[in-house]
Image (spheres, grey):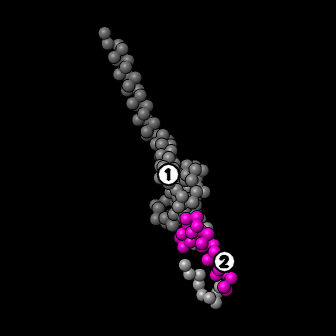
Amino acid sequence: MGLGSAVTFNLAQARQAALEARKLQAVGIDPIEHRRSQRAQKRARDIRVVTFRQEAEAYINVHRSSWKNAKHAEQWRSTLEVYAYPVIGEVPVGELIGLKNIVVLNDEAHHRYRERPQVEEEKLKGEKKEEAERNNEAARP
């Protein structure tokens, strides 16, 4: 395991580093892997965390000009604010898992389906038809 240049580390520092490496080995930890892990953790802490909300807003801003109507951007934003942001808005994008995404999208899709007027009309027509069929069956001798 190298420490670097002899100019960078004096003998006392090199001995101290060697002692720490031997202590890690004594408890079954590879000192080189440990150092790599420490560096990776530091890099991960230094990386700027992007949340779902930030990424979604960036997406809307990039695609806004390609949508036919300015209202579409507001519909996107409104839908996300109502359904997605309260649940996953502040979650880092890298931590999102499929199940949580599916739950949010299913809730939103269910709401949109219920809110569509033609769906409600079709539902009422179906209920009336079923009721009429029950009445006809009850009236038969």
Name the residue carrying label 1.
101
What amino acid does circle 1 point to? Answer: Asn
- Residue 93 spot, x, y in % from top left: 54, 60
Q: Quadrant of the N terminus?
A: bottom right
Residue plotted at (50% across, 54% down): 97
What amino acid does circle 2 point to? Answer: Gln
Q: Are marks 2 and 1 in contact (CB under 8 Å)?
A: no
Can residue 72 be seen from the camera position used here? yes
Name the residue carrying label 2.
16
Element at label 1: helix
Direction from residue 99 to residue 53 in the image, left or right: right
* Numbered badge on residue 72: none
Direction from residue 138 to residue 104 in the image, left or right: right
The one nearer the camera, 9 or 63, is 9
- Local crowd size for mark 2, using a 10 Å CA cut-off: few (<14), some (14–19), many (≥20): few
Compared to residue 138, the image places residue 5 above or below, namely: below
- Local crowd size for mark 1, using a 10 Å CA cut-off: few (<14), some (14–19), many (≥20): few
- Residue 91 spot, x, y in % from top left: 58, 57
Q: Which badge, 2 or 1, comes first in the chain's sequence? A: 2
Residue plotted at (51% across, 67% down): 62
The residue lying furthest to the top in this view is 141
- Nearest-to-viewer mark from 2 and 1: 2
